[in-house]
Image (tube, helix red, strand yellow):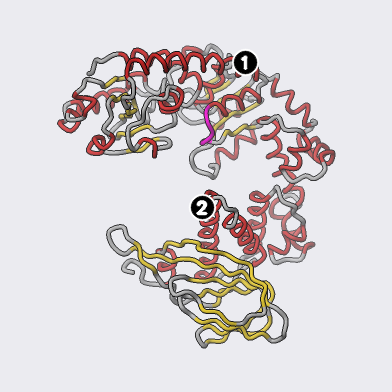
Amino acid sequence: MQNATNLPEQLAYYLYKLEDIQHIHTTSSRFQQETNLHGMLLFTKAKGDILIEGRIFPLHQQKVFLLTPGVSVELRLSTDDSVEYTYIRFHALEAAHEGHFASAKLQGLREVTVTHFPFLLVQVDEIQRKHHSGNAWESMKANILFQEMLVVLFQDVIQEPKQDLDQAIALTVDYMKQHYRLEITREKLAEMAGLSADYYSRAFKKIVGKSPMEYLNGIRINQAKQMLLQSHGSFRTIAQRVGFNDEFYFSRRFKATTGCSPTIYVKQFKQSSKIASLKNMLTGHLIALGIEPYAAVMNDAFPIAHRFRNTIVVGNPIPDLERLLSAKPDLIVTCGSRDVDKSLKEKMFDQIAPTVTLPFFHNWRVHFQTIANVVGKEKEANDWLERYERKADLTRKQVEQKIGNETVLILGVGKGKMCVYGQRNLGAVLYGDLRVSLPKGVEEIAHYKELSLDALSDFDADRILLTCFKHDGTVQTDEAIRKEVHRLFNDSRWQALKAVQNRSVHCMYESRHLYTSYNPLSHDLFLDHIQYMLMSESSK
């Protein structure tokens, strides 16, 4: 390993892959670690010693040992009782050459002192459950959780700090946020923090401002708000999904927190007209439902401002918290980013008004129907979708008659950048609703992929739709994209492409993101435009 010269660098430099995880309850005292795998032993019940390659370590519960490949292990139990431990086998890999990886060996680690061992066991249980679920995606999540566990474990080893009180409380706060659906008691949280229950409660309230269970109920109520607005689930179902076993207790806690019952809470938003949209795509959803947003982030990259008369502008291109606060909306709708964690600003929206955050990766139809449910426009949404499906079916037949099985590539041009759009945005309409053939390689692109001009020939597309990429709505970007397109069209590599030679390049970059925003309004407008775009054989 050339780039890591000490233990911290070594641990951070390697890649780790979970092989297997087992909970073992046995009286057996010997085993041999495989020659190509590392091991980890987490003891929950044990008395005696453990012998690793001739070196003796005292053995008791809440102990973790790391095993390098090929080592021999012997348990010397002080009684005839059985031993309980979790045995994790994993690969440690290091970069070798030219993108290849080779087995590595963790040096300098044997016995590991773990702070807050109960919390570690919770992570281990979840990893084991996902790894043995039989579902490939769950297995992938298990490996991600395993790597996150190693980060915490190794940082403990290197830094060797005893977590102070603030860190202990923060650990339990994080646990509540991640596992609010589970049965959680004050005693369990105190055990994770390594404190007595009474002292933990006093310390938690002093630091956080609420008791642990009040804080937990607050998390559950906030999750319930989202579910009440976004689903048709019964109060009993929603109560159970957020961790309340009793729906009547849930209703009492909900009213104590919000000032109204769950029924009234849902009803007031379905009747509200003061809706703030913080994303262009969500504004498109509202317009398709016949709703002019009370407030919205306005950006000329999505040129629909002419449709509004009374909408309050609360940001360009991102929300301005002061403007949003001054607008005093009843409800905020936004969409999560591709990153899992919310930004600090996103966390503050709920302090201004109840906020519905739609998951980024959900289908646009799901987004549309979710918003319709929130604002009481379910019938309008269903009627709109029925009209759209008929229109898409008619357009699909016309396009198929014209271009047959020819492949169409959606190419985005920005300031010094270029991308191929995949099966989201325009691709959802072109490849999904209209069933146009994908060029080879596009099936692997979910959203978009930045690339160089040299890589375009790999797609071997029959036709190209030329649109914009990351337009910020300014005239300066308009001009920059025109220059990029001009350079592109005069490049010999571009001129050698099949679609260019066949004069099958269709330009729509002047429309900015009118057609590429992921919402029903944009998709409907694109259907209106695509006949001209695909039927025309002209090229710039």
| 1 or 2: tag closer to the N-terminus | 2
Q: Badge 1: how crowded within 10 Å, few (<14), some, or many (20+)?
A: some
Q: Can residue 532 be seen in this view?
A: yes
Which amino acid type is shown beneath numbered disc 1? Glu
Indicate whether residue 362 is drawn in magenta. yes
- Residue tagged by mark 1? 380
Tell me if I can see residue 476 in this picture.
no
Disc 2 packing (10 Å; few <14; some 14–19; many ≥20): some
Q: Tell me the residue at 26%/35% (across/down).
A: 456
Q: Residue 477's x, y, as percent? A: 32, 26
x%, y% of residue 304? 46, 16
- In the foreground, 222 or 41: 41
Q: Which of these two is toward me, 308 or 496?
A: 496
Judge from the rendering whether residue 252 lies leftward or rightward of residue 499; answer left or right.
right
Q: Quadrant of residue 494?
A: top left
Cα separation, mark 1 vs mark 2, equals 40 Å
Q: As drawn, which residue projects farthest toward the left?
A: 492
Q: Nearer the viewer, residue 34 or 56?
A: 34
Residue bearing mark 2: 140
Residue range highlighted in magenta = 360-364
Secondary element under disc 1, as helix, strand or loop, is helix
**Residue 189 in the figure: left or right of residue 311:** right
Which residue is pictured at 42% across the width and 15% down the height? 395
Q: Which of 106 and 76 is in front in this view?
A: 76
Three-letter code, disc 2 = Met
Tell me whether circle 1 and circle 2 mark residues in contact (CB < 8 Å): no
Residue at (60, 38) in percent of width and height: 348
Quarter of the rendering occupied by the N terminus: bottom left
Please provide percent x and percent y for residue 462: 27, 26
Left or right of 389 on screen, residue 488: left
Residue 14, located in which quarter of the rendered image? bottom left
Mark number for residue 348?
none
